[in-house]
Image: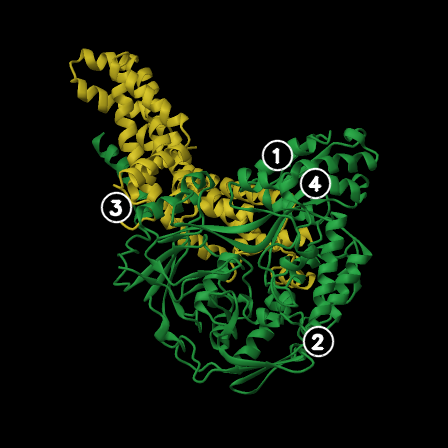
Amino acid sequence: MGKYLVKRVLLAIVTIWAVATITFCLMNMVPGGPFLSEKAISPAATAALEAKYGLDKPFFERYVTYLKDACHGDFGLSLKQRGRTVSGIIATKFPVSARVGGVAVLVSLLLGIPLGVVAAYKRGTAVDSILSVLATLGIAVPSFVICTVLMYFFGVKLGWLPTLGLNTPKHYIMPVFALAAYPTSYITRLMRSSMLDVLGQDYMRTARAKGLSQRVSLFKHALRNAILPVITYLGPMIAYTLVGSFIVEKIFTIPGLGGEFIKAINGRDYTMIMGTTIFLAVFMVIMLLVVDIIYTIVDPRIKLK
Amino acid sequence: MKKKLIVLLVAMAMIIVPLSACGGGGDSGAADAGKQLVVQVGPNPETLDPALNSAVDGANTILHLYEGLLIVDENGQLAPGQAESYDVSEDGLTWTFHLRDGLKWSDGSDLTANDFVYSWKRIAAAETAAPYAATVLGPIKGFEEAAGTPAEMDEEGNVTAEAIPGNLDALAVSAPDDKTFVVELSAPCTYFGSLAAFATMMPVQQATIDANGDAWATSPDTYISNGPFYMTEWEQGSHITVAKNPNYWNADAIKLDSIKFMLIEDANAAYSAYQNGEVDFIKDVPTEEIPSLEGNEEFHVDPIIGTYYLNLNCELDQFKDAKVRKALSLAIDRNYVAGTIMQGTYTAAGNFMGPGWADPAGGEFMDNSNGGKPYIDNDNFEANLEEAKALMAEAGYPNGEGFPEITYSTNDSGYHKAVAEYLQQAWGELGLSVKVDIVEWASFTPMRRNGEYEAARNGWVGDYDDPSNMLELLETGNGNNDGKYSNPDFDAAMKASRETTDLAERSAALHKAEDILMEDAGCVPVAYYNDFWLQSAKIDGMWHSPYGYWYFMYADIAE
């Protein structure tokens, strides 16, 4: 396993380097720049800004300097949010997104897995049909629709829930619901189909023939085997959910990281684009590694080589 | 078996719990905020450093935290701010500001005329890279020398002219004593008072900037100001709270204890918060809601100095003929565009310079334009359309025959797309076919500036109310002359307006410039901008200026 880990970490570094390089090239190819505004800034001011942030240097030199600094953990200053460092912005915004996202991940696991099991077990019944309709809805309806509908009914019409920020647990209800709808539905469907697969296996028939109770055979024997696809999905899902959603954060005015991704691109804030992309890439790679390790715990037949 | 399941659960919990737990417990609910006004004037500002800010919402916040030499009062007139009075020399070149007694910063230290010297030189310094430096300091003697000149390069990146480093001592601002601030101009500038009230020109404290660098303006602890309020909290992307500044000279007149600027980005979110009573004032009203708000006493519409206009790229052969440009302009039913498409949130434009611009000779510029009549008679659209058709025929394109397809470029926000669709139909009446090209905002600006388009949406909101601020956009070589309009007569009129010290002559030159521009259809004005907002009936004593700012400092809330 030690050898495996070393190999994976090396591979991860290559992956992150590739992501950084591609992002760096792409963002420099897009027209526009961080210092363009509707009112033309004088050439002197533009030149001074470019000199200050090193944008006057040739492309390759900037690329090398960036990688060197990034290796030392220096992601530079945001070009748009003057006086703030990229690491500082990520450090203040990520925890906010992660708080909402973390709750949403827990909710989707705690709801999605049991619902999937129930749907598989009650296959063909009304319960299965209802769950499958709900799951399809959850996947098909985009989050901005969910947000708007929730906000309209619970925030404005009924006035039960606050619509701004994250001050109290009550504030979490709508954003978490909006964030968790898709993963919950997805996990329910994954769980249902893989459970159906497992339930048809010989060892399940054996378990039942041996007289194991319904509950034990379902939740102990079947679940452990059926949960593997959910774990595969979990890695990227956790990464994406924790870094925040642009739409949900914008609608509920949550000062999280999700909005920074989009704002950085729209404003051509080069250092923020790089910083947020690398952050997501590192996070994603770590989650995939964790998923691999969890596999070996759940299914001893899997060996990491 | 069971053990492993527990290990699994613990592993998952280990991933999620620390992440979701960190950063928690921040908002323990505001302590007693006293009499607090909660407003929304825009999203999280990129910067609140007065010298670096170039956004309207940033400036609006800055106006509550700082006070310049002069201020704009509730009637839109210049009024004393940090300067109790000022005098202008006979030749109009020397402006002397007399500061009030006992001025202080929010940290209690003294504010003197030297702070203005420092702040204005800081704006001029190239290292500061203040976007508005040339706009606000341009009239001051020695500005170009102070700012320096960047190196010039040809297309291969070879240096053709060496950079000249700036010499800040050259900027002619001085403080003969602690209470007197003297500015020498290179040419008379009748509107310099407006510049002295501009958000960029606020004094900033050298001590905190020296100690904290660029980061000084990001934290309430280091953000020292001199205005009616000072910053107590800035939670990124959530809110900025400012509290009454006890060191402000006019603190007795401030009735609010604090103002909370909610940094809401989404108009629908702002609207919901307003309806819920979480916010007392919102600037971003969703356009879909506007029809339902008509007649609502809390809904306000007020003009600002600015015009929504179209550029026809004058470098292209098909738009070189002024007859064609004029025909395209006359074919637009502006009453329909402003009243129906833009739901009355804009006002139909008959001139380039709309309401609110000050005529150097006194009164409103628009009242004296074209003999008091609008250049384009929007109430007679049928006649305009006939004239447009005739002009197209005269230009050699009867019924639009032989005219190439027009590509109209715009970004997709507000009413831009709806206007584009309207133009397809309106110009279709002339027999022309129009293709709409939607371009993402950050790409749209450079594309328009480089003249890489055929027809495009454009707009301008004035920085100060002197008409030159907008008319100069059409001058040959101006950085914002996106239409590449160039007429020597127009340029000559603008030049004359700058060189004269006589206000009547200056006014005449500016009116002449607009006459030429409108006759030429150098650009196509469509509508005048308005601000529209929702304001709770319990707010009293606030005002809105034609520059697009709201002034809450002297407001009060009825309980």
Q: Which chain is green?
A: B
Q: Which residue is mark 4?
A: B330
Q: Which chain is yellow?
A: A
Out of B318 and B397, give the one closest to the viewer: B397
Mark 1 surroundings within 10 Å by alpha-carbon count, few (fewer than 14), some (14 through 19), many (20 or more) = some
Q: Quadrant of the C terminus of chain B?
A: bottom left
Q: Are marks 4 and 1 on the same chain?
A: yes
Q: Which residue is mark 2?
A: B186
As drawn, the label of residue B422 is 1
Q: Position of residue A106 (x, y in %)?
A: 29, 37
Ranked by sequence position, the earlier of labels 2 and 4 is: 2
Q: Which residue is mark 3?
A: A169
Amino acid under disc 1: Tyr
Out of B85 and B211, give the one closest to the viewer: B85
Q: Chain of mark 1?
A: B
Asked if the residues shown at circle 3 and circle 2 are in contact, with their CB atoms under 8 angstroms apart, the answer is no
Left or right of residue B216, residue B254 in this image: left
Left or right of residue B314, residue B264 in this image: left
Q: Which secondary structure lies at badge 2?
A: loop
Which of discs 3 and 4 lies nearer the camera? The answer is: 4
Q: Residue at x 39, y 69 (%)?
A: B229
Q: CA distance from mark 2 to mark 1?
A: 47 Å
Amino acid under disc 2: Ser
Mark 2 surroundings within 10 Å by alpha-carbon count, few (fewer than 14), some (14 through 19), many (20 or more) = some
Q: Which secondary structure lies at badge 4?
A: helix
Amino acid under disc 3: Pro
Out of A121 and A72, give the one closest to the viewer: A121
